[in-house]
Image: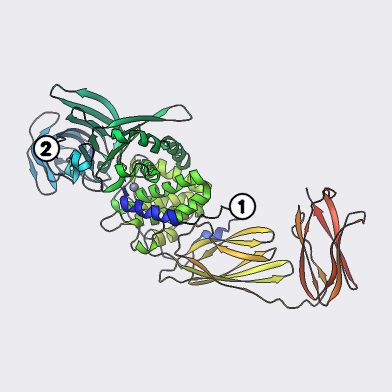
């Protein structure tokens, strides 16, 4: 699900977000210890991993609906096939709210079944006892006029275009328009026969099996899916629509139909807005490592709609005001893997739907604009001041930004901790393991730990089950010993408790380029040493934004004053071998006339690098080979300073 307020906030943030620096495509020698947890961290928390169940399992809903399309009248017949999960099932309780039930039958024998209703449930006495794994089928005939809860009807005047009727169920409103077992963990296959006045089109989940014009001036659209679907993902959307057909063609040549339902006046613009859906499917298949898991993809536009979009399985409902918002389109598309294929077992685990779909928006931006776009998007997705709750088990109204934005940051952080290849492996293994099923947070953590090869409870405890975001101050000093430079980097966490433990990437700029270091920062006040072969010029703290933080402020830079040299010395050049640059360092204890010359193996003087009077101190000269006369091979450099003379060998490798 996507909220409109998210859209507004996002566009504001994007508009004022600075363009980020390009990702430094440089190998980082992984400091494995940086990713391991400190012994003082929180212990692992026991959490239930057993899949939820109840006394029966719904196998299939076969729903026939009639919609008046002049008001909110809805009449239905829901045939529910179930399997007993107990040794003696003689009564079932379905969730049903604000509806009139006219009759209930055993759908196989056609015998009337006794039933009773209370505020939340429909209790059916089955007429026989079902043993474990026995299957049965009941048919519930019902009516409702409830409007704008579960089922929403708007007249042409109210919608501004055409009469529109649609269902919107997440989390617990399917029970207002169909009697069902309305928990995300009981998935079933579904058939939806929707009868509407002629001229209207009914869009729903699965494939359109038939469309029949009836003699009474109505049309029946028969949709069916063999894929397991949770009740909050079932839908009916009806209006006078134009139908836009498209398709996604896999490299293997099989095709997935893409069918969009929009009002006629929007159809030309919508074709343009939706042009990237096939590319989105292809990209997500690649990144997630799991083929698009359903028989079609579709979208139906509605208005008024209190949300941005809703990922109804294979028939996303889109807010007509937001058709041009590609992030929204990609969010709902990505839900077809994360939320629809693997569904949160309960809404405590909602971040497994929404955090993944939100991070998929970032992945789409990265596809379009590279790492700079990813960074920009993630910076725009920080709403730290509004994040007060743990991501796990969000309080009402459930759809808080922690399970969207903060959870997207969780995936960004995991991606860095895992590395690109392992992160993709995680998505692939997780997606395949819980395909067409439900999953909870503990199961995701377990899968992540398997792929990672170690505990991640330190990570989940602070980011999923805990609250807060770190705020860092850092300062650094540099010192030199011979050719080796050391940065002493002090990092302080200045946020109120808790203290976070995270591997952080530091980029140190030197004359020879950028060197990357990953260090684990896990205390209130931490000092780490970074060793370099050239003088550090700047130190950047997580410059590519892989770690969620309020800020990282550089508070001071200082240089340890080196002691005055006590003797002449010529250092080995670095790097060596080299091409085309290398640095030659030397030191003088007293003011001297200095000559630094490069020779070839025959002793011929090729280039004079220094020939001047210099005061006592340490010096660094960068020697750059530009002339073609320097071929690969051995060269010498000689320092003469007063009576001191020393020669060293260096190798040019072209
Ligand atoms: Zn969503």
Q: Residue at x 45, y 63 (%)?
A: 549
The residue that disc 1 covers is 27
User: Is residue 494 toward the left or the right of residue 237 in the image?
Assistant: right
The residue that disc 2 covers is 142
Secondary structure beneath dot 2 equals strand
* Label 2 neighbour load within 10 Å: few <14, some 14-19, many 20+: many
Are the two marked residues, 2 and 1, in contact with CB atoms closer than 8 angstroms?
no
Q: Residue at x 25, y 34 (%)?
A: 190
**Residue 195 occupies quadrant:** top left
Nearest the eye: 217 or 184 = 217
User: Is residue 59 toward the left or the right of residue 549 in the image?
Assistant: left
Q: Position of residue 357 (x, y in %)?
A: 38, 47
Q: Does residue 56 appear anywhere in the picture?
A: no
Marker count (numbered):
2
**Residue 133 occupies quadrant:** top left
Q: Position of residue 536 (x, y in %)?
A: 65, 65
């Amino acid at each position: 699900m996507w909220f409109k307020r998210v859209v507004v906030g996002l566009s504001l943030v994007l508009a004022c977000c600075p363009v980020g620096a390009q990702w430094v495509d440089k190998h980082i020698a992984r400091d494995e210890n940086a990713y391991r947890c400190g012994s003082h961290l929180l212990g692992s928390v026991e959490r239930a991993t057993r899949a939820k169940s109840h006394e029966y399992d719904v196998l299939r809903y076969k729903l026939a609906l009639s919609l008046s399309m002049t008001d909110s009248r809805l009449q239905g017949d829901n045939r529910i096939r179930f399997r007993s999960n107990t040794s003696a099932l003689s009564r079932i309780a379905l969730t049903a709210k604000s509806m009139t039930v006219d009759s209930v039958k055993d759908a196989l024998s056609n015998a009337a079944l006794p039933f009773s209703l209370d505020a939340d449930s429909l209790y059916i006495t089955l007429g026989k006892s079902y043993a474990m794994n026995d299957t049965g089928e009941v048919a519930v005939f019902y009516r409702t006029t409830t409007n704008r809860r579960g089922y929403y009807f708007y007249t042409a005047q109210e919608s501004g275009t055409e009469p529109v009727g649609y269902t919107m169920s997440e989390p617990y409103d399917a029970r207002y328009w169909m009697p069902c077992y309305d928990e995300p963990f009981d998935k079933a296959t579904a058939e939806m026969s929707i009868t509407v006045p002629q001229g209207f089109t009914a869009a729903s989940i699965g494939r359109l099996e038939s469309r029949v014009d009836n003699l009474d001036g109505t049309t029946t659209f028969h949709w069916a899916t063999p894929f397991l679907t949770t009740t909050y993902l079932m839908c009916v959307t009806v209006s006078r629509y134009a139908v836009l057909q498209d398709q996604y063609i896999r490299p293997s040549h099989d095709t997935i139909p893409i069918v969009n339902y929009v009002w006629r006046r929007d159809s030309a613009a919508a074709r343009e807005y939706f042009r990237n859906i096939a590319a989105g499917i292809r990209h997500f298949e690649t990144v997630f490592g799991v083929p698009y898991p359903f028989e079609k993809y579709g979208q139906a536009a509605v208005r008024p709609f209190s949300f941005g979009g809703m990922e109804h399985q294979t028939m996303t409902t889109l807010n007509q005001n937001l058709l041009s918002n590609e992030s929204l389109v990609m969010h709902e598309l990505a839900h077809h893997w994360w939320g629809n294929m693997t569904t949160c077992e309960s809404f405590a685990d909602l971040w497994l739907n929404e955090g993944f779909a939100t991070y998929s928006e970032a992945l789409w931006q990265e596809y379009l604009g590279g790492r700079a776009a990813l960074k920009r998007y993630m910076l725009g997705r920080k709403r730290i001041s509004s994040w007060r709750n743990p991501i796990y088990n969000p309080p009402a109204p459930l759809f808080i930004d922690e399970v969207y934005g903060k959870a997207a940051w969780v995936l960004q952080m995991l991606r860095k901790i895992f590395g690109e290849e392992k992160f993709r492996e995680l998505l692939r293994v997780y997606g395949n393991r819980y395909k067409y099923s439900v999953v909870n947070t503990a199961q995701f953590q377990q899968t992540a730990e398997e792929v990672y090869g170690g505990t991640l409870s330190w990570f989940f405890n602070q980011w999923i089950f805990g609250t807060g975001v770190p705020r860092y101050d850092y300062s650094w000093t540099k010192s030199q010993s011979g050719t080796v430079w050391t940065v002493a980097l002090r990092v302080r966490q200045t946020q109120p408790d808790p203290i976070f433990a995270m591997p952080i990437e530091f980029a140190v700029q030197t004359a020879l380029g950028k060197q990357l270091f990953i260090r684990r920062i896990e205390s209130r006040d931490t000092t780490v040493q970074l060793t370099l072969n050239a003088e550090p010029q700047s130190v950047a703290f997580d410059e590519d934004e892989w770690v969620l933080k309020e800020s990282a402020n550089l508070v001071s830079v200082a240089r340890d004053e080196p002691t005055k040299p006590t003797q002449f010395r010529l250092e080995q050049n670095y790097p060596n071998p080299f091409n085309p640059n290398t640095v030659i360092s030397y030191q003088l204890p007293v003011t001297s006339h200095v000559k630094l010359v490069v020779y070839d193996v025959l002793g011929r003087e090729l280039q004079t690098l220094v020939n001047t009077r210099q005061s006592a101190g340490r010096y660094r000269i960068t020697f750059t080979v530009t002339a073609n006369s320097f071929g690969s091979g051995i060269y010498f450099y000689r320092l003469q300073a007063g009576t001191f003379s020393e020669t060293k060998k260096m190798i040019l490798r072209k």
